[in-house]
Image (spheres, rainbow, N blue to C red):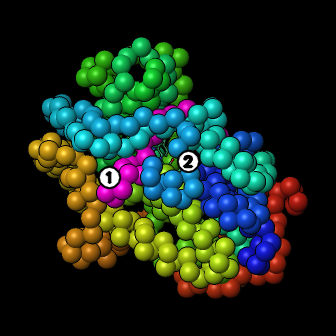
Amino acid sequence: MGSAGGPIHIVGAGPAGLTAALAVARAGRQAVVHEQRCDTGGRFHGDLQGIENWTTPTDVLDELGQLGVEPTFDTHACREGAFYDPDGREYLYRSPHPLFYLVRRGKEPGTLDQQLKDQALEAGVEIRFRDPVTRLPQGGIVAGGPRGPDAIAVGYVFDTPRADGVFGTLSDRLAPKGYSYLLISRGRGTVATCLFDDFHREKLYLERTIDFFREKAGLQMRNPVRFGGTGNVLFPSTARHGEILFVGEAAGFQDALWGFGMRFAMLSGHLAAQAMLKSAPEDYDGLWRARLGDLLKVSIVNRCCFARMGDRGYVRLMRSIGRARDARDWLRRHYAPSPGKRLLFPFARRRFRSRRSPPGCAVSSCDCTWCRAHLSAPESPTAEPRLVSAQASGRPSL
Ligand SMILES: Cc1cc2nc3c(=O)[nH]c(=O)nc-3n(C[C@H](O)[C@H](O)[C@H](O)COP(=O)(O)OP(=O)(O)OC[C@H]3O[C@@H](n4cnc5c(N)ncnc54)[C@H](O)[C@@H]3O)c2cc1C
């Protein structure tokens, strides 16, 4: 699969895998995506998520356009939101430019997942559903999403008569070391608590979150459906294992502070495709480090600082953002690789322990798509050329 001219195999039809497939197909090469579920977006439930728009001066939708991803999915540009500190004080964060774009995730028409699938199919990508792939001996791109929870989010999606709005809060009583949010767009809503600690009391934190937003934001839920999910963050030594390139959350690429992973996923998918198209998988580590490395490092430093703050620290943080005339500028500065943050990174990296499943094995020639040995170990070549999928082998998905 790494061989020039043959198809490039991609494991996972999430944003990372489909963006990679789009790039491959648009360059005239055959892309085959293997997806273990029966459709794209099966991990999600129609929940609203935000694609962040503050880490670059360029608008994220323009950047995605340059990657070949057209914004055919439903988007809602959010320029302001009401945020509450642990004492319940409200701060209005505003920007003349979108702070983020709300998109829906899942299997319904108009979601990011379904629209990416349609774009990929139109470009000629072959997607094999119900096809969990466990090994990529010929190389390829692994975009299989998270494995093990560094953070969890639990909440409800629902219909609502309430007007559109974005609300958030930082409080260890509602979301230890994380945050709670309420997002409403065009009659659909998502309320959730995103925890970075004390996962086993998720039910309690979700109940408190719902009570909080009922009181502060007039939350009204109709036809609520419960959802939940996990996220992974890691700064890998390498996201390559011979001719296997890991992208999106499969590599641990995600904003460690708040868990914004979609932009990382699509960017890394595109970069891996570029390396594969040039038959130069060895270029990939340099490519993702150049575009995503500093962002990932700063987000890990930010997370470690945030985790030490506690409620009094959140108050100071929220006041400081509230004083900014443009919240987007404040956030961009907060994510900029300042000399201080560069200095702190080695310490933060040591403190920040990912809860990803431990490597399944430490065999240097392992071609298993979930083997994490290489993410922290020196690179090594892959084994004999053979693609094994569940369709072909009857193996269960890992
Ligand atoms: C509740 C929740 C809220 C979130 N909110 C936000 C947000 O507001 N903003 C943001 O930017 N990010 C958010 N994220 C994170 C974001 O959703 C992810 O970072 C992003 O989807 C990662 O994309 P991916 O393509 O790497 O992985 P995924 O989207 O997880 O896609 C992986 C795909 O691979 C498939 N797969 C896995 N293993 C195999 C296998 N062996 N064989 C075949 N197929 C396989 C899976 O079925 C899945 O379809 C949120 C996550 C959760 C859980």
Question: What amino acid is at disc 2?
Answer: Glu
Q: Is residue 398 left or right of residue 51?
A: right
- Residue 335: x and y, percent? 28, 60
Q: Is residue 226 above or below residue 320?
A: above
Q: Is residue 145 above or below residue 225?
A: below
Graded by Cα atoms within 10 Å as few (under 14), some (14 to 19) or many (20 or more), the crowding at tag 1 reads: many
Where does residue 317 sit, x and y in percent of width and height?
Answer: 17, 49
Q: Nearer the viewer, residue 240 or 152?
A: 240
Q: Amino acid at mark 1?
A: Trp
Left or right relative to 327: residue 396: right
Q: Is residue 91 visible?
A: yes
- Comparing 168 with 119, the one in front is 119
Which image quadrant: the N terminus? bottom right
Kindly identify the residue that appears in the image at 81 percent across and 81 percent down. 384
Q: Which residue range is magenta in the image?
A: 42-60
Residue 376: image location, x then y, percent: 51, 77
Gap between marks 2 and 1 measured at Cα: 20 Å
- Considering the whole magenta stretch, tell me its main secondary structure: loop
Task: Please check the rendered image and state whether residue 57 is part of the magenta-colored stretch, yes or no.
Answer: yes
Could you say which disc has been placed on residue 70 in the image? 2
Residue 54: numbered disc: 1
CB-based contact (under 8 Å), mark 2 and mark 1:
no
Q: Which residue is depicted at the point 61% across and 75% down?
A: 275
